[in-house]
Amino acid sequence: MALAIVSERHVPPDRILLGGVRDLDPLEAERVAKSRMQVIPSARLPAASLPKGPLYVHIDVDVLNPELSPGVNFHGEGGLHPSELEEAVLTVIRGERVAALNIANYNPGRDMENRTLHIICDLIRCICANIPEYELRTTADSR
């Protein structure tokens, strides 16, 4: 699974970075291999070179180790420790180019002890505490 994945209809493949990849099904692997997407294994995530320009960050929490974070739909072997995901996300947001960010694939039905929920809440707190302040402009301001 991946830290970031977006539709090729909206974002050119050379602008897509799949981070934290550890298990793709055969059709996903074929699609990625034929594209110009950059694939970064879990171990190299923080050091990955990011595409230029504004970034849309999509975080699938199933990139985490399911032994630590059971509240997801996909339980593949291995996965990131929450601190590794946090480090990778901080690397991205500190670059001051994040245009949008979302967190997906939380399944509360599988999160009996709310472990994944707590990890997500900690990640959101970390993002909010570290995201750079952007100059907000309204349509009226740009005239």
Image (spheres, grey):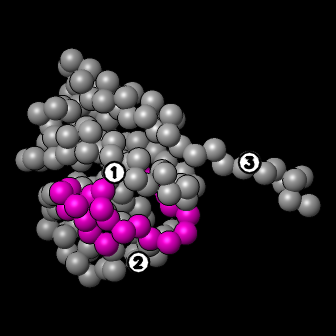
Q: Residue at x 26, y 73 (%)?
A: 32
Compared to 63, does 67 lie above or below? above
What residue is rendered at 72% in x and 49% in y?
135
Within-10-Å neighbours for mark 3: few <14, some 14–19, many 20+: few
Question: What SS does tag 2 mark?
Answer: helix
Residue at left 26%, top 39%?
Answer: 83
Q: Are marks 2 and 1 in contact (CB under 8 Å)?
A: no
Q: Find out whether residue 52 is within the magenta segment.
A: yes
Location of residue 47 in the rendering, given as x and y in whole percent from the top left corner: 30, 62
The residue identified by callout 2 is 14
Nearer to us in this view, 4 or 137: 137
Q: Residue furthest left?
A: 77
Distance of label 2 from label 3 (alpha carbons): 28 Å
Q: Position of residue 50 (x, y in %)?
A: 41, 67
Tell me where the magenta segment starts and ends, as one range: 38-58
Percent across and percent down for residue 24 are 17, 61
- Which mark is first along the chain, 3 or 1? 1
Relative height, residue 93 to residue 40 (above, below): above
Observer able to see residue 10: yes
Label ID, residue 44:
none
Residue linked to disc 1: 88
Residue at (91% x, 61% y) in the render:
143
- Residue closest to the eye, 115 or 93: 93
- Dot 2 or dot 1, earlier in sequence: 2
User: As shown in the figure, which amino acid type bears the numbered disc 1?
Assistant: Ala
In this orientation, does residue 8 appear? no
Is 78 on the left-hand or right-hand side of 98? left
Q: Residue furthest top?
A: 113
Q: Which residue is mark 3?
A: 136
Q: Position of residue 11 (x, y in %)?
A: 48, 70
- Using a 10 Å C-alpha cutoff, classify the residue at mark 2 as few (fewer than 14 neighbours), some (14 to 19) or many (20 or more): few
